[in-house]
Amino acid sequence: MTELIQKKLSDSKAARWTALAIVAFTMLCGYFLTDVMSPLKPMLEEELAWTSTDFGLFTSAYGWFNVFLLMLIFGGMILDKMGVRFTGLGACLLMLIGCAIKYAAVAGLIGQEGTLLGIKAQVALASLGYAIFGVGVEIAGITVSKIIVKWFKGKELALAMGLEMATARIGTMLAMAITVPYAKYFESVSAPVLLCLIMLCIGFISFFIYTFMDKKLDASMVGVEEEKEEPFRFSDIKLIITNKGFWLIALLCVLFYSAVFPFLKYATDLMVNKYHVEEELAGFIPSLLPLGTLFLTPFFGNLYDRKGKGASIMMLGAIMLIGVHFLFTLPILNEWWFATLIMIVLGIAFSLVPSAMWPSVPKIIPEKQLGTAYALIFWVQNWGLMGVPALIGWVLDTYCKLDNTNGGPAYDYTLPMAIFTGFGILALFIAILLKKEDKKKGYGLELPNIKK
């Protein structure tokens, strides 16, 4: 008698890696817009008369709706109830709408004069667009995380997540490296945002193509013997938020990313003010950070898959983060080559923590609750992504502004970098507590992901 063994589509290496490539490209397009305005801070001050406070307010808008309207949490619940296809397409549409509003504002098509709620109309409308985009890209992020778990659970999960993050960071790298030269070539600060809008249209098409693969995966799972899970219920939220391991991961996430992403928003300006790099070239040094993650995040993810030590990897990344920001704080070696070296080290730290942190969540939270759990983690993270850039912008204008004979504003970045160092110290403390909790509860964070 011949035994018929039915396999899922995700058992095919070609299928699961193709699915990963498609959704990772969509996130690349999203991350390009996320950071495209960061290198433009000096140009925004010169051409549109924005202040550091305006720039900080605009950057903080990324988390407004996610934090105060709980859009991320609702997005996570929708993801668990409606699935990845519906949620992902909706998230891509929100990214497009937000980008279009942001472009219209920066290009001067809307909001050229007057104020809204006491804020310059242009700044307010650009912030509104960025806030809508922030909802879309964050929900897209949790959707893609659940997609990867769906295709790679019990397989190369951390490597897949690392490769997705690495691909997305290409968007960040491009934003840092080419934005200023691109804007100067077209003599318009809005030109890079228009490029983002075009890329997001391509990213939307990319995800739409993925939905057909997802349908085939679901069809291939019919009749396959698997451990059946009960459907998500709203009462599951209580189970998540009463889980100490969940809160330690969430706090580590917000503290670590608060010391990285808001720093990237000001990194180009830091290179100009402290390390005296030319404005057109200043973005290339911060672009080394995401460039390093292209290779290292998958490497550390593969290491976690095969050898384990996830909690230890997160601790090491936090220690390196502290060292980097402390060196940026010190008034020594204000040379471009020194900034380049420590930026490379920051890239290593930026690879270590996420490569272990995100694949650790499924070890703490059941799969049926993953969408909501990721959404809650991203929601906590968005408090930092919203508050820290606004704080740094206010600190620069209030305490760090210097006289500049060239006519433009100049800043002393010592205090802002000390604030980033403090976030790194707190992240290390939480990572230590997480490792202790893992020993106590047996989550398996120090164990390999690949099941033999």
Image (spheres, helix red, strand yellow):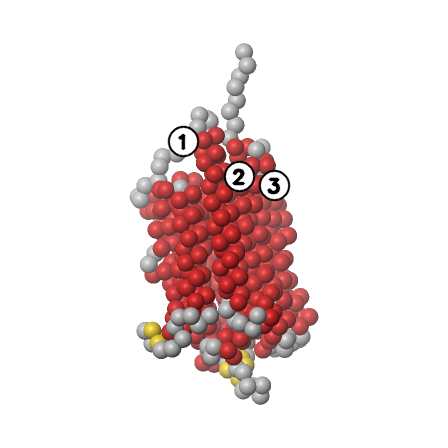
* Mark 1: amino acid: Lys
* Mark 2: amino acid: Phe
Marks 2 and 3: CB-CB under 8 Å? no
Image vertical order of residue 294 relative to residue 182, above or below: above
Q: Nearer the viewer, mark 3 or mark 1?
A: 1
Q: In the visual, does 335 lie left or right of 366?
A: right
Q: Could you tell me residue 231's position as x and y percent?
A: 35, 37
The crowd level at tag 1 (other Cα within 10 Å; few <14, some 14-19, many 20+) is few
Q: Quadrant of the C terminus?
A: top right
Between marks 2 and 3, how big is the CA–CA gap?
Answer: 14 Å
* Mark 3: amino acid: Arg
Nearest the viewer among 296 and 109 is 109
Image vertical order of residue 442 relative to residue 59, above or below: above
Q: Could you tell me residue 419's position as x and y percent?
A: 50, 70
Q: Quadrant of the N terminus?
A: top right
In the rendering, which numbered label is found on residue 152? Answer: 2
Q: Residue at x 67, y 75 (%)?
A: 335
The crowd level at tag 3 (other Cα within 10 Å; few <14, some 14-19, many 20+) is some
Between marks 3 and 1, how big is the CA–CA gap?
Answer: 27 Å
Residue corresponding to mark 3: 306
Q: Could you tell me residue 377's position as x and y percent?
A: 42, 53
For label 1, the SS is loop
Nearest the viewer among 20 and 401 is 20
In the rendering, which numbered label is found on residue 228? Answer: 1
Nearest the viewer among 188 and 380 is 188
Q: Residue at x 67, y 70 (%)?
A: 338
For label 3, the SS is helix
Mark 3 or mark 1: whose residue is earlier in sequence: 1
In the rendering, which numbered label is found on residue 132? Answer: none
Q: Residue at x 57, y 41 (%)?
A: 18
